Amino acid sequence: MWDRVELKSLAKASLKNNYWNAFLVSLVLMLVTGRGGSSRGEDTGEYLARHPEYYMIFLVVVTLLLVFRILVGYSLEVGSRRYFVKLSQYKNTKGCYGFSFDSMNYKGIVSTMFLMNVYNILWTLLFVIPGIIKAYSYRMVPYILGDNPNIGANEAITLSRKMMDGNKFEAFVLDISFLGWYLLGLLALVIGMLFVNPYYDATCAQLYVALRKISLDNGTATSGDFNLNDFNAQDEYNDYDRYYRD
């Protein structure tokens, strides 16, 4: 079983001497996922109600953003997640974005991320709480794709659900544990929140590494699911045991 205090401690250690590179990757991740953006939907609706002539412009902008999110944002997100997983294990982090945009990986990433988001939207439309629960169930999908972009959409989603089974509430508590940091960042002229993101993203990567090893240990997944051969899988064990034991 993983411990959130230990994960956060390991995340801090991995950021040492790598913080500013991690900051830039977190900035990309924030922009493509919309994390940290303020909700202005009500104000936008009121403005469009007063100025219906801008509806078409609004629809065009929303459509372009959606297309960007699908065609570019999904791969940027997976590349960013891959970066933090590599960083968490002190491995070479170069080429993570190139990996996610490679022609051999791109289609698998886009199709899987698209299906995952469709599922999330449908669950949220049904009820908000089930939508939140499902979002936690699918949380590992971008990380899985960072390891194995061609695993298949349903396979990645199913594997994520298995990895998060029994871990969703603890992951929620892990997220809540960053609330104080984000409040401090908010007080620091809002921009301070940006400097918390690398710490949060590095911790989430540590969670994935922990759950990946647990899944391999209990037979929930195979090394092939994570695109690891037997030799690399043993390396993952050794890396995890070393960093979590020291």
Image (spheres, grey):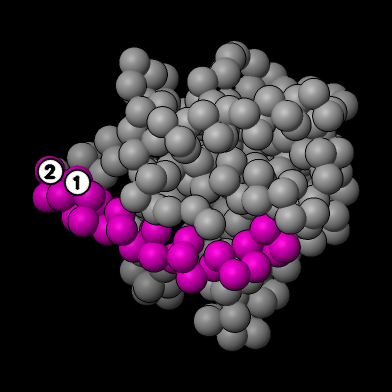
Task: Please name the predominant secondary structure of the magenta segment in the image.
Answer: helix
Residue at 69%, 75% in the rendered image: 122
Q: Are marks 2 and 1 in contact (CB under 8 Å)?
A: yes
Residue 126 is marked as none
Q: Who is closer to the viewer here, 232 or 104?
A: 232
**Label 2 element class:** loop
* Tag 1: amino acid: Gly
Task: Tell me which amino acid carries mark 2.
Answer: Ala
Q: Position of residue 116 (x, y in %)?
A: 72, 59
Disc number placed over residue 188 in the picture, else none: 2
For the C terminus, which image quadrant?
A: top left
In the rendered structure, the answer to whether residue 135 lies left or right of residue 28 reads: right
Q: Name the image quarter holding residue 159.
A: bottom right
Comparing 10 with 72, the one in front is 10
Q: Which residue is mark 1?
A: 185
Is residue 114 visible in the rendered image? The answer is: no
**99 with respect to 168 (left or right):** right
x and y percentages locating residue 188 in the rendered image? 12, 43
The residue lying toward the viewer, choosing from 8 and 69, is 8
Residue shown at 39%/58% (left/top)? Answer: 175
Q: Of residues 245 and 85, which is closer to you in this image? A: 245
What secondary structure is marked by label 1?
helix
- Residue at mark 2 to residue at mark 1: CA–CA distance: 5 Å
Determine which quarter of the picture holds residue 237: top right
Q: Does 134 sit above or below residue 82?
A: below
For image coordinates 80% across by 23% down, the residue present is: 231
Crowding around mark 1 (Cα neighbors within 10 Å: few <14, some 14 to 19, many 20+) is some
Q: Position of residue 244 (x, y in %)?
A: 47, 37
First to last magenta residue range: 161-188
Number of numbered labels in the structure image: 2
Q: Report whether 125 appears left or right of 245.
A: right
